[in-house]
Image (cartoon, rainbow, N blue to C red):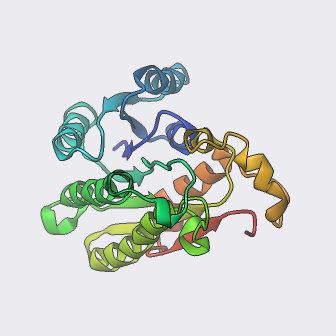
Amino acid sequence: MTQVVLITGGSRGIGAATALLAARRGYAVAVNYAANAPAAEAVVRQIRAAGGQAIAVQADVADEAQLLAMFAQVDAELGRLSALVNNAGVVDQTTRVDALTLARLQRMFAINVFGAMLCAREAVKRMSTRHGGAGGSIVNVSSAAARLGAPGQYVDYAAAKGAIDTFTIGLAREVATEGIRVNAVRPGIIDTEIHASGGLPDRAHALAPQVPMQRAGTADEVAESIVWLLGDNASYTTGALLDVAGGR
């Protein structure tokens, strides 16, 4: 039976790289996107051109109704979910804590934390042997910021990713006897478009000297870690927080 993976925020960056790699490893891939349909469709076309199976699924993970519709579409078009990558996430303009607004905090946590937790909830309902499922794997995309704090830039983002770390450990232990493994990767400075969305398009290169390996990482390097954690080669790994950060 083909393994089915849902990748939130799968239209670009780490999500897109993970979608392409998972497809090469034999997964049927649901590429979730919030608004950029052309980017998601481009990922799907690449997968299909290589002989893989993929669909694009629209949903803002901060909206529970859209999120539920997304899972229903995956059920209907690809079949039983066997893997989830909680990758959808946002940063914001760099700022100090004394300049944060409630609206910014609500958006940050709605997408980065609440969305991930609700997606995990729906995945557990489908995967857990307690619910009649056959098991599965969840990988949450956290950040090295969870342990570095991101002072002067986005402490709110770092705090949200810290919540993801704690959630990963707790859920992993909660469903360990139900056939589900739950892990997280914590990317460091990775050269993707996310920096531009926070107003610092050159951030990855500017911060490279702070990395012991003296370079930014790539989305493909993070994808390799995610897909490893998803698969059977990581069969005894759960509750792990894997740093993919060049030693930073």
Percent across and percent down for residue 41 are 44, 22
Of the 4 image quadrants, the one containing the N terminus is top left
Judge by depth and name the residue closer to the eye, 176 or 36: 36
Percent across and percent down for residue 151 are 61, 68
Rendered view: 184 above or below 21? below
Q: Residue at x 53, y 53 (%)?
A: 227
Judge by depth and name the residue closer to the eye, 227 or 168: 168
Rendered view: 34 above or below 219? above
Q: Residue at x 54, y 48 (%)?
A: 93
Q: Image quarter for residue 54?
A: top left
Percent across and percent down for residue 5 are 38, 45
Q: Residue at x 47, y 29 (%)?
A: 52
Q: Image quarter for residue 35?
A: top left
Residue 232 appears anywhere in the view: no
Q: Image quarter for residue 59?
A: top left
Rendered view: 225 above or below 31? below
User: For this view, does 21 lie left or right of residue 9?
Assistant: right
Judge by depth and name the residue closer to the eye, 110 or 13: 110
Residue 207 appears anywhere in the view: yes
